[in-house]
Image: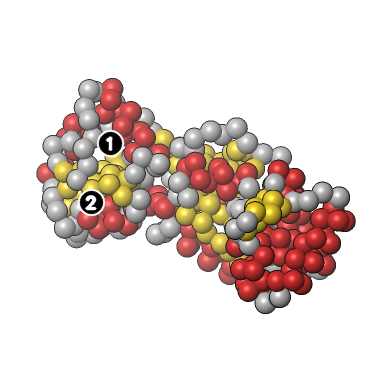
Amino acid sequence: MRYLKTFELIEAVVRAGSIRKAAEDTNLTASALNRRIQQFEQEFGWPIFERLPRGMRLNPAGELLMQHIGLQRTDLARVQSQVADLSGERRGHVSIACSQALLPYFMPEQIAIYRAAHPGVSFSVNIRDRAQAEQDLASFSSDLALVFEPVHLVDFEVLCALPQPVHAVFQHDSPLAQKTELRLRDCLEFNLVLPSTAYGVRNLLELAATRKGRILAPIVETESFDLIRHYVTCENAVGFQIPIGLSTEKQNTIAHRPLSEKDIPIGRLLLGQMKGRTLPVASAKFGQQLVAALETRAAS
């Protein structure tokens, strides 16, 4: 695994931007680290860094090498997971990029279920908006992505799609709770607490408002769905969320209702992976579990 150590040193230089700083981070002397980099460049056949007066940065050959390093790590993790599987173990690491809506209830429950059967597996849960999640897959930073209304879908292989209507969130005693059908115009009579424009819920709301000649003017705009849920308990305002991120239990503080499909079409929560990629065993198995859980939700 000596080449992996060299890759780690190269990555340290990329992060630090200089040999001196990277040497401090890796507990090596600057001269020793520089020799390792130069020796690798000789073996590789090309320089991979531009050596500047104030530090180091990757040249085009180095950028290609960094992509290769990511692929090598991913492939090694897949092989290690498969070997562990052959020996009757279930070890490995699962990295998943997901929308904030999955954090309060769905994702903790699913991870706990998986780890109850396979306690040797660890997880990284990366909070990403819909564009960032696809970038995570492309850079191999995450094995799986579970996001609402992804943007591009060019290299996104959909494993499962769960319909999710946009819900309005408000105080439990709001007059909105009494509506037999909740329309967007009803919500626009209140102060609005909206997710930022990077999120699928906001995109659907903006499209709906534009069609009706209205402008969304939030009093609070945030990347935090927790803030949206909690702020409406402090002021007579309306927030928006998808139901998978909301509690199904009756609460004495907030209520939520779906917006009419006459105004906003039902969106899709998509589980996916990088197209054509063979996932490590643990990630593939967890993906299968998520598909089953999402299909159960869809059926109910």
* Residue plotted at (32% across, 45% down): 195
- The image quadrant that residue 285 belongs to is bottom right
Image position, residue 98 (x, y; %): 49, 51
Residue 246 appears in the picture as rendered: no
* Residue plotted at (49% across, 35% down): 151
Kindly report the distance in space between the C-alpha atoms of the residues bearing marks 1 and 2.
Answer: 13 Å
Which mark, residue 255? 2
Viewer-side residue, 96 vs 31: 31
> Which residue is disc 1 drawn over?
259
Image position, residue 86 (x, y; %): 81, 64
Q: Classify 88 as above or below 101.
A: below
Which mark, residue 152? none
Q: Quadrant of the C terminus?
A: top left
Horizontal side of residue 294 vs 257, given as left or right: right
Viewer-side residue, 59 vs 281: 59
Task: Please state which amino acid type lies under the numbered disc 2.
Answer: Ala
Image position, residue 97 (x, y; %): 53, 52
